[in-house]
Image: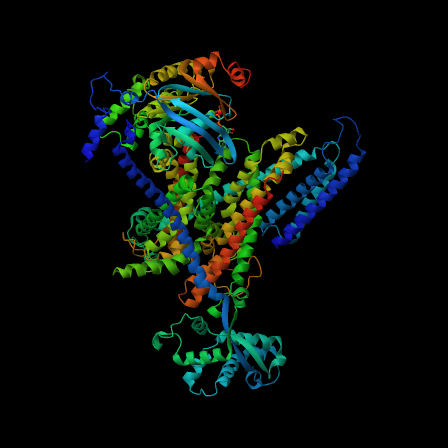
Amino acid sequence: MVMAETNVVRADGIFQPVLPKGDVVDMAKKRREPDAEKAKFACRDVRVFYGASEALHGIDMEIANSGVTALIGPSGCGKSTFLRVFNRMNDTIPNARVTGDILMDGEDIYGKKVDPVLLRARVGMVFQKPNPFPKSIYDNVAYGPRIHGLAVSNSELDYIVEKSLKRAGLWDEVKDRLKESGTGLSGGQQQRLVIARAIAVSPEVILMDEPASALDPIATAKLEELIDELKEKYCILIVTHSMAQAARVSQRTAFFHLGDLVEYDDTQSIFTNPKDQRTQDYITGRTG
Amino acid sequence: MILEIFLLIAVSSLGAFFFGKHLAQSRLALAPVGGLSDRAHSLPGYHGYFAAWLVGLAGFAVAALGLAYPKLFNGGLLLALFVAAVGGGFAFSYRQIGAGFRARIQVERFVKGALLLCSGVAVLTTFGIVFSLVFESLRFFEQVPLLDFLTGLQWSPQTALREDQAGQSGAFGAVPIFTGTFMITAVAMFVAAPIGLLIAIYLSEYATKRTRAIVKPFVEILAGVPTVVYGFFALLTVGPAIRGFAEGFGFSVPTQSAIAAGSVMGVMIIPFISSLSDDVINAVPQTLRDGSYALGATKSETMTNVIFPAALPGIIGALLLGVSRAIGETMIVVMAAGRAANLTGNPFEAVTTVTVQIVSLLTGDQEFDSAKTLAAFALGLVLFVLTLVLNVIALLIVRKYRERYE
Amino acid sequence: MSAFESIHQSDRAVKRMTRRRGQELRFRLFGLGAVIAAMVVLAWLTISLVGTGYTAFYQHHMTLEVFLDEAVLDPTGERNAENLRKANFRKIIQEAIYARFPEVSERRQKSALFKIVSASGATNQVRQMAYANPALVGRTLTLSVPTSDDVDQLLKGYIDRDAPEKRRKISNQQIVWVDALKATGEIKSQFNWTFFTGVDSRDPELAGIAGAVVGSLMALAVAFVVSVPAGVGAAVYLEEFAPQNRFTDFIEININNLAAVPSIVFGLLGLAVFLNFFGMPRSAPLVGGLVLALMTLPTVIIATRAALRSVSPSIIDGALSLGASHTQAVFHHKVPLAAPGILTGSIIGMAQALGETAPLLMIGMVAFVTEIPSGLTEPASALPVQIFLWSDSAERAWAERTSAAIIVLLMVLVTMNALAIFLRTRLERRW
Ligand SMILES: Nc1ncnc2c1ncn2[C@@H]1O[C@H](COP(=O)(O)OP(=O)(O)OP(=O)(O)O)[C@@H](O)[C@H]1O
Ligand SMILES: [Mg+2]
């Protein structure tokens, strides 16, 4: 019985323990294709309350199945709040309450039968400040696969760790010091480590909340490169305060203002031809 | 007698205050009014305080002399000295007080000196403890060799009271006491460590704010209950309950046993461990929790895999403090553990501890120089050193840990 | 199910999730269980103490017609104190009881009859009255005297009437008498004032906590007078004036370690230094208070320092900018603002001192003291020590009084702590 289940997972072509180097099997490619054109998320009238105060005033929005969607807007407009709606991280804030519908692949993620724990395995997140666990680099990356039982053997776990670190562009820098503490890395390396940590769980979506705000320009450039690669396989939502970054990495951009979604369009159009005055003021630096 | 002396000093001092203040008022009134530098330096009140301090100190010095050498200074001589000193204080104040005198600076100097003296009390206490324990212990080890004390397997201090047996090897072998102490400590920690930790985890990670606000004070009540109350509880309720329980299974346990005393002591220690662990768990940054939840970990997985390892040094520190409490606790064991110095590994028997022996050696009639009473100080020294080492290690660990996350 | 599933939606993942949820639930229940366990023990403690102790607050008394027979007490008729002191009051009480049951004539029976009342309680009561007013001799008085503890326990229901007579402390005949007296209302239960006004005694029905309470109050007063000023002074110095050097570091470490020294070690200090070196009296509240003061000193210092630290340092800057000296700024502004915290810390320290027993045993405050101490150097006991002493006696009547004394002690402690919390919330931050 157990064997059969293991085979099911393997039949997905997700894990192949011993592979010739360089021939990395893509864990997300295959399942990305069938509904690539459909929306990954559909939001209807999403409101978030902190206690009695409403931080988001009814957002309607669809997020495409692949590519990068950027969320921009002045500080305090609710970007982080909106981002945390997608992996139900708002559930961990005692007085936060979310109303409205958020459908992921057509399924209500706030539905009664949905376990936020499993949802978060499918929707990864990268935080503003890198937050590696005070464990070894290896254990940081292996943590997710371990709790979700993604590897049946140690070699398989090694393989997942290696692949995730490679995909996060960190492998070459850390391959000789996997047993060292993750907190000993530089800020940029730490941020890539937590991305590797998120990827290792095989999510479908990666949420990033100002992932570059604690990084210097070179580390930021590396991170943007990484995002550019990852967008092929993952649906990515990124919150950023840098117009330039939004323009560089995203295909679509949403502009938030005081808890409202003001404008949502192709990045190209938003930056060249904003329809709303507030958007224009913001991207040209007149407010914000 | 002492009370009268203090009263006399207080009255002189108070008199000096009004004397100084009035003198200053009249003299400062005559001082030229003008620019910044010409103005009187201090308010009249400070001149009063200055005189009061001076007179008080002078009186105090004489009184101390009288107390220290009652033979030399007594009666008329002491009174004469006292009058001279107080009079000198008044005279000196009379000469000094004036517009140019910086009374405030002097008073503040007195105040700082007094405060420094207060801090000195804590230091003196430590010195007092160390010296009295070491001094009496040395006298004990003149009679009983240190090695016999630390490695001897038989403890029967009563026999050593007789002249011919004093210091005989075997009578003061403290090993059964140490094993008893450690057994009770082990039982206590066996109860307190898991319960205290689980309470800390539950309150910091699972409980709602309301539950926490209600439960926490109740847990802390356990820390405020006097130990003599726990001792009586062990004797009256827990001991008989354990005995009854054991009889149900067909074997007999005395009312006074290591298990009864240890488990009640464990209850006493629960709040120490839970509140210290609660602090260290809360000190683990929220970002680590968020990171773990965002990967799809449950709360328990986050707790055991991320928070607990991160908080481990602090938790170890908390446990060490708990152990130190358990070793030093007296009343519960005196009342509920028994006094027989059994060398046993069975927690269902009566055992004795360092603190119990100190109490039983020192209560009742005794001459101070007998090996029996001095033994109590040797045990006290062991106790002091042991708890001190545990505390220093625990404090170092906790401090290191705090630095890591601050 | 949609056309394509993530690995996290596979059957295997879902099954695994069920297991993980089980783990989560178990973990959570363990935590809840620990909390409940602690609460249950607290409840058990309270219930067992209150359950044993509440009956000590009332006691059975017997109404007796006592004839102060001049022939027994003062045959010469002089009515002087000398004669009355030697007089046989015990016989007076005996006669009074025998008169109540004239049908009893056998000697053994009579002696059993006398055991219904508290012999020394009743005798002392009559003796006191006669001393105070010699004119009473020759008259008949109606008195309410305490019954013996066995009768009291019987009527409180703690002696099993069905047990074989030999294994009972009270005979069948005595039970008959007591029941008769109870039925006529001659034996009544009333509030046990003796428990609050009396001192220690060999007889449980006469024992009270007044002596111990006064001893505790005296020791506490000494502890307060020494430890609060010294503690606050030390804290103010360390927090506001101390230069950053080795010496102050040393003091700091010292205080932290002192806070963790077992209390019994302070008792040894008191014994070696105060009693043997300075030759202060044994069993005295003065010495007890000094030992407790040293013990609570670290608590007061640590609480005061925390309170001082919680006052914004900008207060000092503000005062300095107005031309106040540093000392003035500290004493006029910072210390008053920290006062609630200091007060709370002091009360908590005193509560700790009030419940402490072990160091008092070391300096001899375990003596059997049958008077209310009249001075700081008189032999005295203390409430927790009294509890310890009483707890040694196995009789039900003593267990009852021990528990009652504990109830009193705990009530005082709860009041002190509640006061501390009240003061902290009430006085805090009113600026
Ligand atoms: N835990 C919370 N409790 C109460 N209010 C909150 C909480 N978190 C956020 N808010 C409020 O919700 C609103 C939106 O906050 P949010 O953090 O989503 O803004 P943001 O757009 O991410 O800002 P920034 O760019 O500064 O990160 C703000 O007004 C904020 O004060
Ligand atoms: Mg934000």
Q: Quadrant of the N terminus of chain B?
A: bottom right
**A122, above or below C259, in the image:** above
Q: Is residue B150 left or right of residue C143?
A: left
Q: Quadrant of the C terminus of chain B?
A: top left
Q: Is residue A147 left or right of residue A2?
A: right
B329 or C22, which is in the foreground? C22
Q: Does the image show residue C279?
A: no
x, y percent for residue C67 = 56, 83
Numbered marks: total:
0
The image quadrant of residue A179 is top left
x, y percent for residue B100 = 74, 31
x, y percent for residue C5 = 28, 28
> Residue sitting at 22 percent across and 17 percent down?
A21
**C284, above or below C72, in the image:** above
B390 or C160, which is in the foreground? C160
Q: Does the image show residue B218?
A: yes
A71 or A62, which is in the foreground? A62
C317 or A201, which is in the foreground? A201
x, y percent for residue C105 = 44, 88
**A280, above or below B32, in the image:** above
The colour style of the image is rainbow
The image quadrant of residue B45 is top right
**C346, above or below C322, in the image:** below
